[in-house]
């Protein structure tokens, strides 16, 4: 407006023509977008620079988990704990106290206990997310510290309770971490996770996007996608860390029966606070305050009528009510 006003005065005074004003306005218009874009790009560069600094800080962080001897060994899946103890330094809580058990390759292990009893600590130590304070963890009779950690972890399927999914298609979320992009395997993994019916009801089936720009999934559906993601890798050891908490009992039984078939010759570890999740396991550990207070199979633990039996009775009564 100022340009038009001043220009009008100059036209009346005979210093400019209307064509001069029009040319000037066109040039101003042509310069507006480049100047705006420059400011926009500057803002993006500043944000990218800040993000890159944070990424570099993460990448430069030195790990305290070091492999003593880098052996790329294809494991069979036996797991043995020998008097393992671990204390969380920040809280002083004993995560494990003198824990001992042996799990042969191809066997199934159930770990049950209340919240905070130390169940997940056992799972995290098998993944070697930290080094234990004392005792030994043996994988195929080899000290876990002597295995190349990256190669070893690639042979483990781990499903945590808190699931992380990407804002991407269901297919890509299941395939994450897998070296094989075979769609038939994706479908089979979804079937074994009792997810096929849900996926078929979505508009784009396996190509349906989830997350911010897609559909919203229930807690149980998220957990089952995470299970499918783990089993498509065909791991030597499968760890389910209380990841069936958001599914109903019927769905839970279907998944566990399917897992029993696909993990027939592989090691599986199921962690839960529900007996229905662990009762099919060959061996069950009852954990309390970081200690193994009972171990055996479902039938033998019911016979001794101690902690496992009491928990079983409580859950039966809870289901009735």
Image: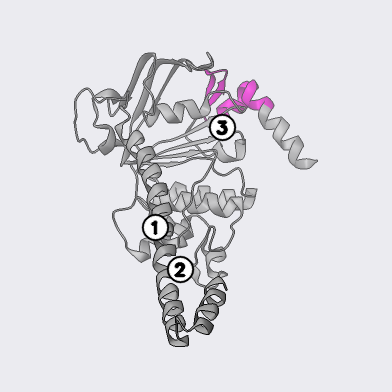
Taking depth in this image into account, of 304 and 252 the one nearest to the observer is: 252
Taking depth in this image into account, of 23 and 253 the one nearest to the observer is: 23
Local secondary structure at mark 2 = helix
Q: Is 176 on the left-hand or right-hand side of 198?
A: left
Measure how far apart labels 1 and 3 are at the Cα level. 63 Å
Q: Is 196 on the left-hand or right-hand side of 177?
A: right
Local secondary structure at mark 3 = helix
Q: Which mark is residue 298?
A: 3
Bin the neighbour count of mark 2 within 10 Å (Cα to Cα): few under 14, some 14-19, many 20 and up: some
Image quarter where the C terminus lies is: top right
The answer to whether 252 is drawn above or below residue 70 in the figure is below
Q: Residue at x 31, y 36 (%)?
A: 59
Rendered image coloring scheme: one colour
User: Which stretch is magenta?
Assistant: 285-310
Bin the neighbour count of mark 3 within 10 Å (Cα to Cα): few under 14, some 14-19, many 20 and up: many
Q: Residue at x 39, y 57 (%)?
A: 41
Q: Which mark is residue 257?
A: none
Local secondary structure at mark 1 = helix
Q: Residue at x 52, y 47 (%)?
A: 256
State the residue position of label 1. Answer: 41
Q: Which mark is residue 207?
A: 2
Q: Is 142 on the left-hand or right-hand side of 25?
A: left
Image quarter where the N terminus lies is: bottom right
Mark sitting earlier along the chain (2/1): 1
Residue 307 in the magenta stretch? The answer is yes
Q: Give the x, y percent position of residue 279.
A: 56, 37
Labels 2 & 3 near each other (Cβ < 8 A): no
Residue 72 visible: yes
Q: Give the x, y percent position of residue 102.
A: 39, 24
Labels 1, 3: front one: 1
């Amino acid at each position: 407006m100022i340009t038009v006003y001043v220009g009008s005065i100059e036209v009346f005074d005979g210093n400019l023509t209307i064509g001069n004003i029009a040319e000037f306005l066109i040039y101003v218009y042509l310069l507006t977008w480049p100047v705006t874009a420059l400011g926009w790009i500057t803002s993006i560069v500043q944000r990218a620079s800040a993000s890159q600094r944070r990424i570099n800080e993460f990448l430069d962080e030195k790990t305290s988990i070091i492999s003593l001897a880098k052996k790329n060994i294809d494991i069979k899946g036996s797991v043995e704990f020998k008097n393992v103890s671990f204390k969380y330094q920040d809280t002083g809580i004993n995560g494990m106290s003198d824990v001992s058990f042996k799990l042969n390759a191809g066997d199934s292990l159930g770990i049950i206990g209340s919240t905070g009893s130390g169940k997940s600590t056992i799972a995290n130590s098998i993944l070697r997310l930290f080094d234990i304070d004392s005792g030994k963890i043996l994988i195929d009779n080899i000290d876990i510290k002597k295995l190349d950690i990256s190669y070893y972890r690639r042979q483990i399927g781990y499903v945590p309770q808190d699931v992380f999914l990407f804002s991407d298609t269901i297919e890509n979320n299941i395939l994450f971490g897998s070296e094989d992009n075979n769609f038939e395997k994706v479908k089979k993994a979804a079937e074994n996770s009792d997810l096929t019916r849900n996926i078929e009801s979505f508009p784009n089936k396996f190509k349906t996007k989830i997350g911010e720009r897609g559909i919203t999934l229930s807690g149980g559906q998220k957990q089952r996608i995470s299970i499918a993601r783990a089993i498509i890798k065909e791991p030597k050891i499968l760890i389910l860390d209380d990841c069936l908490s958001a599914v109903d009992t019927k769905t839970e039984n279907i998944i566990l029966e399917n897992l029993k078939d696909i993990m027939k010759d592989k090691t599986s570890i199921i962690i839960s606070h529900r007996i229905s999740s662990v009762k099919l396991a060959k061996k069950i550990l009852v954990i309390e305050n970081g200690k193994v207070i009972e171990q055996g199979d479902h039938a033998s633990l019911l016979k001794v009528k101690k902690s496992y039996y009491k928990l079983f009775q409580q859950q039966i009564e809870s289901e009735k009510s």
